Image (cartoon, rainbow, N blue to C red):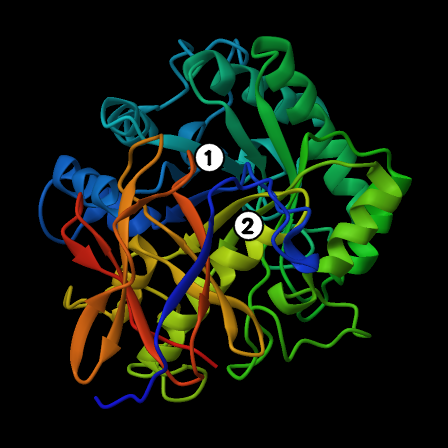
């Protein structure tokens, strides 16, 4: 690919996350952590062993793995001593296998509790809340005692949607699930961090918008350490920072500042966790999918946006592998036949343009290799169909992040090289 460029001059390497490099990043969330969720693939394959799949997650270079623990599956019958994980009514085999595997591979779980057993809600489906808050409180106590090494917890998933919680009311969620779960987990694990809400981006049929849900949780005196949200795009054309509806009651990544304002207004300066996010791809989804290249670009942009936003401390990609049913999620980093999408490369080495002023462009990137501390990388540019290094190899900061300001004509192609991973990032064309 031919590109005409001026002579390249490296201006500055900004190595500290907290250093203000532009107005938009002056309050960057230096503590943001990235992760992935794919319960079905992690548990059941279809290929390889659990340890092999855990090693695959290790190679992605992100520490967090969100996993769902279903109350209705762990406690299909009423326990006699519900606060004791040793009660014979509990069946911990499935979560034990995964959570102990994550611990063995030094991966950090974000554990979601969801699903009411029939004995606790009058024989109804798992999405009906338990009428007696003490039932969920006792279960949360047992889970915390079973897995004392788990630090990050989520109470339910998308309770603002009828699919996941009925009655779909913030007051029911807070009083019957969130507050009892928060109190129980903290009584056992004082240093745990409990996320509340995990709201979906829209209300859906019979649901409640996230804007209204935040206010409802505040009125019900919700207790949580971080507000969780799933900022999926509302349309395929929406990017992580553009195309969202600012005046609508839903909240996507493009309008996530709306959530930051609401949470601060009602709950103070609590962190925000983005615990589910992704882009459908075409192929295979010809209706809602974006191109493979666009998915890769958007995931890099989302990683950068999460880093730049104040109080956002978590971003979790959903999924690793596309789901078998075309009508479901096709947001994976690999296809159903395990072929790589370009987004897999972008997830391991996110690389994006942060800004531009005249002939100066600011680029942002992260080297994810599963280690803490500074990491070596090299920036390269395409000149006369040959990739050339831009200066010498450099070090990221302790979070694996780097920012570079370069002088270049628009249209130039860049990439980064990670010697540790022996991988290149996706190519980035300067706009």
Q: Which residue is mark 1?
A: 110
Residue at (50, 49) in percent of width and height: 315
Residue at (59, 48) in percent of width and height: 127
Per the model, the C-alpha gap separating discs 1 and 2 is: 19 Å
Q: Choose the circle earlier in sequence order: 1 or 2.
A: 1
Which of the 4 quarters of the picture holds residue 135? Answer: top right
Q: Is residue 368 visible?
A: yes
Neighbour class for label 1 at 10 Å: few (<14), some, many (≥20)? many
Q: Which residue is mark 2?
A: 307
Percent x, y for residue 24? 67, 59
Percent x, y for residue 197? 67, 44
Which of the 4 quarters of the picture holds residue 94? Answer: top left
Q: Is residue 5 left or right of residue 138?
A: left
Residue 313 position (above or below residue 89): below
**Callout in the foreground (1, 2):** 2
Q: Quadrant of the N terminus?
A: bottom left
Residue at (67, 38) in percent of width and height: 271
Residue 168 position (above or below residue 119): below
Residue at (67, 76) in percent of width and height: 244
Q: Is residue 79 visible?
A: no
Q: Is residue 3 left or right of residue 87?
A: left
Kind of element beneath mark 1: strand
Nearer the observer, 169 or 54: 54
Residue 193 position (above or below residue 254): above
């Amino acid at each position: 690919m031919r590109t005409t460029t001026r002579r390249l001059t490296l201006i500055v390497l900004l190595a500290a996350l907290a250093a203000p490099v532009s107005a938009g990043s002056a309050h960057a969330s230096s503590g943001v952590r990235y992760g992935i969720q794919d319960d079905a693939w992690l548990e059941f394959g279809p290929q390889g062993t659990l340890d092999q799949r855990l090693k695959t997650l290790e190679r992605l270079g992100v520490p967090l793995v969100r996993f769902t623990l279903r109350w209705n599956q762990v406690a299909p019958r009423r326990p006699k001593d519900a606060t004791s994980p040793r009660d014979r009514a509990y069946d911990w085999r499935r979560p034990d296998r995964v959570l102990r595997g994550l611990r063995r591979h030094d991966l950090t779980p974000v554990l979601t509790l969801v699903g009411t057993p029939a004995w606790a809600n009058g024989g109804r489906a798992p999405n009906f809340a338990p009428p007696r808050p003490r039932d969920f409180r006792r279960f949360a106590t047992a889970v915390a005692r079973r897995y004392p090494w788990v630090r990050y917890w989520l109470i339910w998933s998308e309770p603002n949607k009828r699919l996941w919680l009925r009655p779909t009311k913030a007051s029911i969620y807070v009083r019957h699930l969130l507050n009892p779960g928060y109190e129980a987990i903290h009584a056992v694990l004082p240093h745990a961090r409990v996320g509340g809400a995990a709201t979906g981006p829209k209300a859906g049929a019979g649901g409640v918008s996230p804007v209204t849900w935040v206010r409802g949780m505040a009125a019900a005196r919700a207790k949580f350490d971080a507000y969780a949200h799933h900022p999926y795009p509302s349309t395929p054309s929406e990017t992580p920072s553009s195309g969202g509806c600012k005046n609508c009651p839903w909240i996507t990544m493009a309008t996530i500042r709306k959530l930051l304002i609401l949470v601060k207004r009602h709950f103070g300066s609590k962190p925000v966790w983005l615990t589910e996010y992704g882009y459908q791809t075409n192929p295979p989804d010809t209706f809602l999918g974006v191109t493979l290249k666009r998915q890769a670009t958007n995931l890099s942009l989302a990683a950068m946006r999460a880093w730049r936003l104040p109080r956002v401390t978590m971003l979790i990609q959903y999924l690793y592998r596309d789901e078998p049913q075309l009508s479901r999620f096709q947001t994976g980093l690999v296809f159903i036949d395990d072929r790589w999408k370009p987004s897999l490369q972008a997830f391991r080495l996110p690389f994006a343009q942060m800004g531009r002023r005249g002939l100066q462009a600011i680029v942002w990137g992260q080297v994810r290799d599963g280690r803490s501390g500074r990491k070596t990388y090299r920036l390269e540019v395409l000149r006369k169909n040959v990739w050339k290094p831009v200066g010498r190899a450099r070090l990221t900061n302790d979070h694996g992040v780097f920012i570079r300001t370069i002088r270049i004509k628009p249209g130039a192609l860049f990439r980064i090289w990670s010697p540790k991973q022996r991988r290149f990032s996706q190519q980035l064309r300067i706009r």
